[in-house]
Image (cartoon, rainbow, N blue to C red):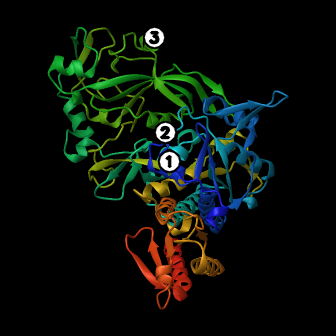
Amino acid sequence: MKLSQTFIPTLREVPGDALIASHRLMFRSGMLRKLSNGLFAYLPLGLRSFRKVERIIREEMDAIGSLEIKPTVVVPGDLWKESGRWETMGEALLRVKNRLGTDFVVSPTAEEAFTALVRDELSSYRQLPLSLYQINTKYRDEIRPRYGVMRGREFVMKDAYSFHTDEDSLDETYQAMGRAYRRIFKRCGLTVIPVRADSGAMGGSGSEEFMVESEIGDNTLLLCRACDYAANVEKAACKPDWAGGEGISPEAARTAAASTAAIEKIDTPEVKTIEELCGFLKTDAKRFIKTLIYRAVNVELDLSSAPGNHRGEKRPSGELSYGETFFAVLIRGDLEVNEIKLAAVLKASEVTLAADTDVVRLTGAPVGFAGPVGLEGIPIIADLSVTAMNDAVTGALARDLHYTHVAYGRDFVPWLVTDIRTVKAGDRCSLCGGELYEKKGNELGHIFKLGYKYTRSMQVSYLDEAGKTRIPTMGCYGIGLDRTLASVIEEHHDEAGIIWPMTVAPYQAIIIPIKYDGAVKTAADGLAAALENHGIEVLLDDRNERPGVKFNDADLMGIPFRVVLGDKNLNLSPPMVEVKHRAQKENRLIELGRATEELTGLVYGELAELNR
């Protein structure tokens, strides 16, 4: 391909809104242009690399037996109403009506569409397991799209969904997907960090994210210095402090509680916050039990044994859910509640701190004076940290009053004890006890064990070997193509431009004649034709530009091999050409007669290394 015959509008200036390397370089190199905020168009150079990422993903999905289909992007709203996400997805969901007033959704994700398609065809266990995937356009009405295609409103994703008769079958596909994802990212030249993650709005249990380190990452990762533990902060767990020698264990706390002084009510005038209490009582936050009142929506956890402020409703599937429920959540005073973990424990679509009026109604006290002792009519959920507290301070359910000498198990018993702590750098690894540290990361892919969330709500069934009706369990596996491509640039660039890995480079070699005429033109055309005959993708810079401009554009575009032809080297005996690898500083001369063979070997060698 001659450069004069393609459309690569390179820029010298950096776009004013481009804050990260991939955004700057995709625009400057002529890969991308913006149509509107969060909406981008791929130009020929960018689309070539995009298609290569797409091809790698498709090859790896096909290799594990996943079958490609092509659903619509616009999906009937009734399917989203069946799943319950029409109400819970929020304003990111683009809802539209057709001329007849029928509701539709511009897909932000495809669980409903795939589940409906399988539901209409599934009848027997013999059809399972089944794994289907798409590579398709999505739309999410982001409040603040930024960082180019890293967070756009319209984007392309690979979505795969699998359907199974049992958990063993689901786990087999889940593990195969995980291996395929690792191969995909390796072939793209990316260094990824697989982390434990929360399933979020997708639902389900098992979940793993594939992250790339990024200074502008939307996710905080916790990693262990001593082992391979890695988790998103939304999911991260840590060893309790007493396991590291700080404080006492729950067993020791229960023993000590027997000799702890009796609970005592004290005046704390105008003292509401943990910080104010620390100063007033001359102690530290680790002595306090913080009590927070949370409102939860669409709780699917069984609350039949819990104190009742909840309201049960029957969903179409017959599953019991609770429209709005309030909980008292306890955690040690120096720690923070992880609301993502709390929502996951409750199987709730949303958790938020309760309004002040609800706090007063449920506790009988102003905000800042709630506590578990004597609290009735509301389920109490305690973090594990509370179980080791035997001489604590809590609110006394009245203005300007607190309790001291409060002991867990003696003075109050929670309805549920679980891990709802936000883990931070310096905490101890849950696997080996090593120190955890933080990194920022961006998610490229996410695999879930969805379980029965969609197949139940959308009434999918099949007949098992005994002729009994069963509900299949389900998995979900996604990769963002735009974000993957941008992340390759984030990892592979320098001050001059992109440095493409061979597998996703738009072209594998660029031929630059110093002056495109006479013998130089003849040699350049001949070399380009010979390389293309050997399957090498070549861009020939035939423009009437200064050599410096051509060299700068070649570096900006990041094409792996640059081959320069000029009268000086072609007049040597034998004729020579100058070859430079984009990732290396030095160039070297090779014989024109051997250039095709040598460059072909180098290109295919790099491809083999990445694809191995």
Which residue bears the numbered disc 1?
Answer: 23
- The three-letter amino acid code for the residue at tag 1 is His
**Res 254 visible:** yes
- The three-letter amino acid code for the residue at tag 3 is Thr
In three-dimensional space, the C-alpha distance between marks 2 and 1, rounded to whole angstroms, equals 9 Å
Q: Which one is nearer the viewer's eye here, 427 or 18?
A: 18
Q: What is the tally of numbered marks visible in this picture?
A: 3
Circles 2 and 3: CB distance less than 8 Å?
A: no
As drawn, 525 above or below 161: below
Which residue bears the numbered disc 2?
Answer: 17
The local secondary structure at tag 3 comes to: helix
Sequence order check, earlier mark of 1 and 3: 1
Query: In this view, which residue lies farthest toward the bottom?
Result: 573
Mark 1, Cα crowd under 10 Å, few <14 / some 14-19 / many 20+, is many
Which residue bears the numbered disc 3?
Answer: 357
Sequence order check, earlier mark of 2 and 3: 2
- Is residue 573 found left or right of 456 in the rendered image? left
